[in-house]
Image (cartoon, helix red, strand yellow):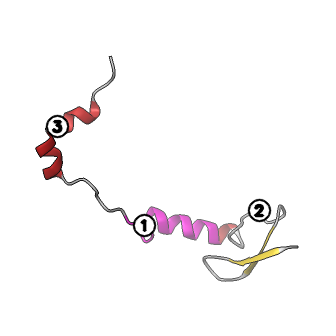
Amino acid sequence: MTLTVKCPQCQKPVTWDASSAFKPFCSERCKLIDLGDWASEKHAIPVKDDISEELLDQLGYEEADFFKTAD
């Protein structure tokens, strides 16, 4: 059974198999356009800060603590 998906950039059908060199994209052009969108931050993965700076201060953590090397 051959799986067919839509190219995320142009929506053309793409066969999902070993012969599809740029899957899930239909071409190198679409792949590079998508890469450029990520590089220019048109796409982003949302991040929620679970720990606020205030909480870290209350717990006694200093920014320099995060860059210490193990001796």
Displayed quadrant of residue 43: bottom left
Query: How far is the residue under mark 2 from the one under mark 3?
Result: 48 Å
The residue singled out by tag 2 in the image is 21
Q: Which residues are magenta?
A: 30-46
Q: Which secondary structure lies at badge 3?
A: loop
Q: According to the image, label 1 marks what residue?
A: 44
Q: Is residue 7 magenta?
A: no
Q: Nearer the viewer, residue 2 or 27?
A: 2
Residue 53 vs residue 45, the one in the foreground: 53
Which label lies toward us, 2 or 3?
3
Q: Residues within 10 Å of mark 3 (few under 14, many from 20)?
A: few
Residue type pointed to by label 3: Glu
Q: Is residue 15 above or below residue 57?
A: below
Left or right, 7 with reference to 62: right
**Looking at the image, which is closer to me, 67 or 42?**
67
Is the residue marked by circle 1 packed among few (<14), some (14-19), or many (20+) residues within 10 Å? few
What's under tag 1, amino acid-wise? Ala
Q: Which residue is mark 3?
A: 62
Question: Viewed as shown, does residue 69 lie left or right of 17?
Answer: left
**Can you say whether 8 is above or below 28 in the image?**
below
Tell me which residue sits at (16%, 50%) in the image: 55
